[in-house]
Image (cartoon, rainbow, N blue to C red):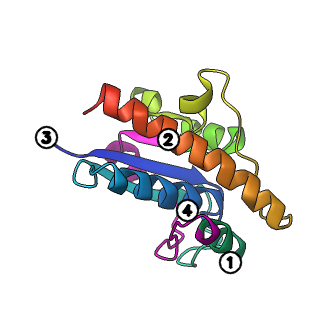
Amino acid sequence: MAPIRVLFVCMGNICRSPMAEGVFADMVARAGLSHAIEIDSAGTSGWHEDEGADQRAVAAATSRGYDISFCRSRPINWRDYGNFDYILAMDDVNLRTLRSEASEDLEDKISLFMRFADGEAARSVPDPYGGDAGGFDLVMDMVEEGAAALLAHIQKSDL
């Protein structure tokens, strides 16, 4: 069976989506499912292409035992829409961008990341980039909640 492929998407791919990628990868590994689930992240812009994650994001993740030092920013590309089973936007702005770029037949795989924790009335994960370390801690809280719910969903529905 082909692996389930999950892509987390924010604007610059240096804060929220790498945090989600790292947390989800850790949860998948602890569940013994790294062979069955592939994980990546991307941005809707190329502003930070090939940069590592924001140091505040790295610090917030590290403080909770997650490693996101491997993450490198990249913009989403047209192949991603066909290659990933789940394309998860961190907020409404990026969700609209993703849906505007995808063909209609692929829109079902695009949703808000927090949908798995919240149901259809999903919250946006706020962008902490312009703020202080407290914003990154809030994002980590949301990412841990969303990643656990996503993993439970995939285990129930896809594996």
Amino acid type, residue under disc 2 in the picture: Ala
Q: CA distance from mark 2 to mark 4?
A: 16 Å
Amino acid type assigned to the residue bearing label 4 in the image? Pro
State the separation of the CA atoms marked 4 and 3.
27 Å
Contact between labelled residues 1 and 3, with CB atoms less than 8 Å apart: no
Q: Is residue 74 visible?
A: yes
Q: Is residue 101 visible?
A: no
Q: Secondary structure at mark 1?
A: helix
Camera-nearest label, 2 or 3: 2
Magenta segment boundaries in residue numbering = 62-87
Q: Assign a secondary structure to mark 2.
A: helix
Give the farthest residue toward the left.
1
Q: Mark 1 = which residue?
A: 55
Label for residue 18? 4
> Pointer 3: residues within 10 angstroms few (<14), some, or many (20+)?
few
Q: Residues within 10 Å of mark 4 (few under 14, many from 20)?
A: many
Label 4 secondary element: helix
Dot 3 corresponds to which residue? 1
Residue at x-position 49% and y-position 57%: 21
Bin the neighbour count of mark 2 within 10 Å (Cα to Cα): few under 14, some 14-19, many 20 and up: some
Mark seen at residue 15: none
Q: Nearer the viewer, residue 156 or 41?
A: 156
Residue at the spot of label 2 = 148
> Which image quadrant: the N terminus?
top left
Q: On the image, which quarter does residue 97 sit in?
A: top right
> Who comes first in sequence, dot 3 or dot 1?
3
